[in-house]
Amino acid sequence: MHNIHYVRTYANNAQNACNFVESEIESWGDENNWRTICGAVNKKGKVLDLTVQEKSGWFRGRWKPNLKDVKECMNDVFHNGDSYYKESVDKLIAGKELKSHDWWKVKKYAEWKSAKAWSGVKDEFNIWEDTFREWELDETGLTDINRLDDIDGNEPFIVFIDMHS
């Protein structure tokens, strides 16, 4: 499964933001779980695009960095969840019999609701302030990785990570 996960960090330029995030998550994954840094975007919408088309036609990194896309994606994921999982919750509420896969979908829906409650976000999701599913790199979400000394004199970036799990 592929998903996008975003990381908010501070750096003096987009390449340094990507390098920092790569070093912070380098221990995540194995031969079946891997990631590609796709690039970064700053508050002004300036993009560093690291996606590369291979000779085979495949792209390394599926998501091209874009400020509008990250805002829309996070608001959609945060507020709407996934109707695929909600179907089984609706069956449960209606008293219908659930199969094992339905129970898995109920679990995934409950995890989303729990993450949403823990985030503390009440209205629109703000990618420059809020987090969602922090460090759940194999889920669509936004993690904040900052050290206090990184903030002074640096600008915020959202780094795009193509996650495969």
Image (spheres, rainbow, N blue to C red):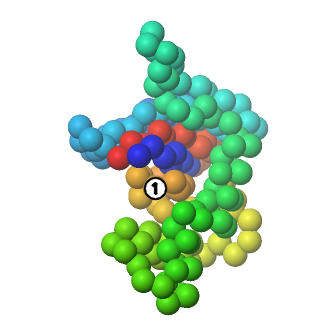
Q: Is residue 92 left or right of residue 40?
A: left
Q: Nearer the viewer, residue 88 or 110?
A: 88
Q: Nearer the viewer, residue 138 or 17?
A: 138
- What's under tag 1, amino acid-wise? Glu
Quarter of image, res 35: top left
Q: Is residue 6 above or below residue 90?
A: above
Question: Residue 125 location, x and y as percent?
Answer: 69, 62
Q: Nearer the viewer, residue 98 or 64?
A: 98
Question: Residue 62 location, x and y as percent?
Answer: 52, 32
Q: Residue at x 51, y 19 (%)?
A: 52
- Circle 1 SS class: loop
Quarter of image, res 27: top left
Q: Which residue is drawn at 68% across and 59% down?
A: 75
Q: In this view, does 118 lie above or below 11?
A: below
Task: Please say whether residue 156 is visible from this viewpoint.
Answer: yes
Task: Please say whether residue 16 is visible from this viewpoint.
Answer: no
Q: In this view, does 7 lie above or below 57?
A: below
Question: Residue 8 location, x and y as percent?
Answer: 56, 49
Q: In this view, does 54 lie to the left or right of 126?
A: left
Q: Residue at x 42, y 72 (%)?
A: 102
Question: Residue 40 location, x and y as percent?
Answer: 58, 35
Q: Residues within 10 Å of mark 1 (few under 14, many from 20)?
A: many
Q: Name the residue under label 1.
A: 139
